[in-house]
């Protein structure tokens, strides 16, 4: 099966549309690793698209807060203001859809879908030292995760008789994207990056394509109508910093 793997769309309609155009004809089904909403100005169109088009989707921390399942007590003031605004904007149908999203990990075609990590849906995996138990609990299955908004992930490398976790990132010099072949004998934690709010100093929308038969993951980036996404955020009365950061990729 050929998958389009998206995560952290964050109500950025322009970025989502650009990803769909870039990936057209390259996938058969879509999975989403959470954070459908939050930060961006189009929570309803994006949620409705997910409802209609995504075969398997799990919840992210912003989804939980923006639909009222949790309070934004752990969010910074900017994120909390955006979450409260989103809760007010969402239709009743879209709020209920987000409230019903599954908590990861969820298995799909031999791989695991998580938002933060295998052990904690809200955990940020940013350092290889934090991933050892992830590999153990994945039990040999590849893991696709989001939450950090950083495209890349972690692998288990053989170091003598021991396995050592190491970070990897796609080759930014490859304009059409770079590939990683998943190997059953080696643990893999794969982050497709964020569609709607990248934080790896690259403002281009990020996503991945995964072929479960060949085991190949292709990391891709694409430009989108950044100016329109920024204008929508400002016009909605959301914190201006949310518009500014889109141009910086952080």
Image (cartoon, rainbow, N blue to C red):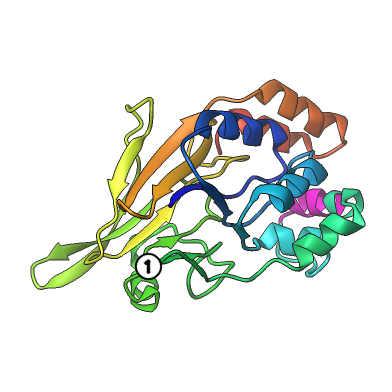
Q: Is residue 94 visible?
A: yes
229 up-or-down from 140: above or below: above
Determine which residue is flagged by label 1.
131
Image quadrant where one finds the C terminus: top right
79 up-or-down from 13: above or below: below
51 up-or-down from 15: above or below: below
SS class, disc 1: loop
- The residue shown at (52%, 65%) is 114
Mark 1 is surrounded, within 10 Å at the Cα level, by few (under 14), some (14 to 19) or many (20 or more) other residues, namely many
- Figure quadrant of residue 224: top right
Left or right, 101 with reference to 175: right
Q: Position of residue 13 (x, y in %)?
A: 71, 35
Magenta segment includes 82:
yes
Q: Position of residue 2 (x, y in %)?
A: 44, 47
Which range of residues does the magenta coloring cover? 76-85
Left or right, 204 with reference to 100: left
């Amino acid at each position: 099966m050929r998958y389009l793997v998206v995560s952290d769309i964050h109500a950025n309609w322009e970025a989502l549309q650009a990803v769909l155009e870039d990936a057209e004809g390259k996938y058969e089904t879509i999975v989403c690793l959470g954070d459908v909403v939050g930060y961006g100005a189009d929570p309803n169109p994006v949620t409705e698209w997910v409802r209609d088009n995504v075969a398997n989707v799990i919840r992210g921390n912003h989804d939980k807060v923006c639909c009222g399942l949790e309070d934004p007590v752990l969010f910074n003031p900017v994120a909390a203001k955006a979450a409260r605004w989103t809760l007010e904007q969402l239709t009743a149908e879209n709020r209920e859809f987000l409230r019903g999203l599954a908590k990861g990990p969820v298995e799909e075609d031999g791989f695991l879908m998580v938002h933060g990590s295998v052990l904690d849906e809200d955990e940020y995996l940013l350092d290889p030292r934090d991933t050892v138990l992830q590999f153990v609990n994945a039990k040999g299955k590849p893991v696709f995760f989001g939450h950090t908004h950083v495209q890349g992930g972690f692998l288990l490398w053989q170091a003598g008789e021991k396995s050592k976790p190491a970070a990897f990132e796609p080759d930014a010099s490859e304009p059409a994207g770079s590939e990683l072949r998943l190997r059953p004998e080696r643990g893999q934690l794969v982050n497709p990056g964020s569609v709607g709010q990248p934080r790896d100093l690259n403002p281009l929308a990020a996503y991945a394509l995964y072929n479960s038969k060949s085991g190949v993951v292709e990391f891709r980036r694409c430009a989108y109508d950044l100016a329109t996404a920024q204008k929508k955020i400002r016009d909605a009365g959301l914190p201006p910093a949310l518009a500014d950061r889109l141009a910086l990729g952080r």
